[in-house]
Image: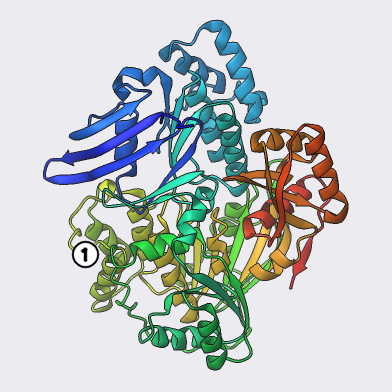
Amino acid sequence: MTVEPLVSVKDLVKNYGQTQALKQLNFSINPGELFGLIGPDGAGKTTTFHILGGIMNATFGEVLTMGQRPRDVRLQIGYLTQQFSLYQDLSVEENLRYVAGIREVLPGEFDDRADRYLRAMDLLRFRDRLAGKLSGGMKQKLALCCALMASPKLLLLDEPTTGVDPVSRREFWDLLSTVTGNGVTVAVATPYLDEAERCSRLILMHEGEIQEMGSVAQLKAGLNMKRLEVRGNKLEALERRLRSTADRLEKIQDIQAFGDRLDVLTSTPEHTEALVKEAQPDVSIEVQEPTLENVFVNRLKGKVHVDHKTRYPFIEKPPQSAGIEAIAAKNIFKTFADFRAVNNVSLSVQYGDIYGLLGANGAGKTTTIKMLCGLIQPTGGDMLLCGAKSNLRSAALRNRLGYMSQKFTLYDDLTILENLEFYCGVYQVQDPLKSERINWVLANSGLKGQENMLTGRLPGGWKQRLSFGAAVMHQPEVLFLDEPTSGVDPLARREMWRMIREFASGGAAVLVTTHFLEEAEHCSQLGFMVAGELVAEGAPSGIKESQPGRLLEMRFSNQQGAYELLRTALESWRVSVFADSLHIVVDNPDIELPRIIDVARAAGIEVIEARPLPFSLEDSFISIVKRASNGNGSKGKAV
């Protein structure tokens, strides 16, 4: 049967003066679909949502929602914008009541919906708390509750999980699966490609045009390529050799360096595997399917220009001896009144290392970083920073550090150039290095020619790149980065990590926090924090391989029914929706898989397919955090 689309877009054009933001868009969204929009900053995703939500009119073309103009059915459309749309000085319940009044929700319906959505979001016990006192993840979940109050038929979500920790992101997307299962059609724009894997269909946009459209499986298959995961020693030398080969051979489409591996994208995996082995015989190679990031980067290669050939103007410094600690902590803890925010954390970061500190919101990551870089005094424990064990707040020591905080730290009412000149003054960067480093920041941020623009007018992704540049103007030997790529699109994120690796290769020690688990693969070592404690530590591959049990990908004749059933039969965190399949974590697959099949069949649901998957870093993180929170995890190290 042919299904009439809920949203139909034909030849959509939107002009802002002489700028054409959208160019002849054609797509449709089916009822009950979880539809995704991905693309770099400035691709036109938000403009598309403004038109779909009835906030803005198209210049040309036809847009119909439920057979009518979006403006005429706005009460049936929920819209969660990029910026928090909450009133910070109203409580959780007062925010819901305010939205319910605007959306003409009847009092009896309000009580039922408020209880249902707050319970689903685990916000019921916080209904009297001010919205301004909620964490970032809780704010986004409340904003989603507000968007759902009118029981919309169409729900538009514009980058809803930016800055939200991985646990809250997983819970958020699991709730979206329930929402679509209840008949709501969802369209979501996201910079996180691991999230986009959960959508039933996607469009990849660039400069107002659709580059690709289809399911995740179709987009990956359309590459006609495989991804080689290469592990071993001396990967930097291997990367340089392969890149020189890639310049001559079209078979290698992309090479990406991670913390303990190289990813090589190729259309001839057997030939390329032999080429890698010839270059370095002692490596191990696993052939994998391409990722959605491979699709994103490959399709947009050459369309987005960033001058990454402009190298940072390093000053030669005496190299640090191998194995020298740049950052060290032994049993440090921090108490605020009667609350212990960080509890006996011990870690070590050597020069040339990239150490990733991961954890949910409130786990103690930012407090730990502030102690390690001397911004706040620990209540107890021992620390070492750049060889110093005391007087960690001295001006001389602080000038050897770079720090990029969670919040954007530049001045919105200064121009880009004025901000960079200000930081050169703060860090005592002298001419001619001053002009060279400003030029490097502008080139690597894609902001050449925009020097006189007010910084406040920049999109979030560009602000983050500029903030990173300002943090390294003085060539620090230790670099602290607190969620540096929040809200940054995948191409810009890749460029930022290239720059971070460039500093580590130059001998700097880097400690970074991130909520984006795919990019944590760039780190050489990882530490996972839960409730102020370091509960796991090791290389990315070691952490994934050390996970107990198995991760299963399963397809069912009734996916929504299976999802709701298994989340009650198992611990809820063990079951998650990914497009047309469920990912299920089991401790003993030989025993638990037959039980899952029996439970499903007893409910009239047949298992179509069940196959093992390797743990991703996000799966590992969720497993470690949930096991530790439930008291059945154990602190340890992964080799």
Q: Which residue in the protein does label 1 denote?
A: 448
Q: What residue is rendered at 55% in x and 82% in y? A: 270
| Residue pictured at 47% horizontal, 26% vertical | 147
Viewed as shown, does residue 154 lie left or right of 603?
Answer: left
Q: Is residue 273 visible?
A: yes
Front-most of 230 and 457? Answer: 230
Q: Position of residue 231 (x, y in %)?
A: 61, 79
Which of the two residues, 572 or 164, is positioned nearer the viewer here?
Answer: 572
Q: Quadrant of residue 281?
A: bottom right
Counting from the top left corner in percent of width and height, residue 32 is at 51, 31
Q: Position of residue 214 (x, y in %)?
A: 44, 49
- Rendered location of residue 428, percent (x, y): 33, 71
Which kind of residue does numbered mark 1 sit on? Lys
Residue at horizontal 69 percent and vertical 64 percent from the top: 544
Image height of 309 relative to 566, above or below: below
In the rendered image, the quadrant that contains the C terminus is bottom right
- Residue 5: quarter of image: top left
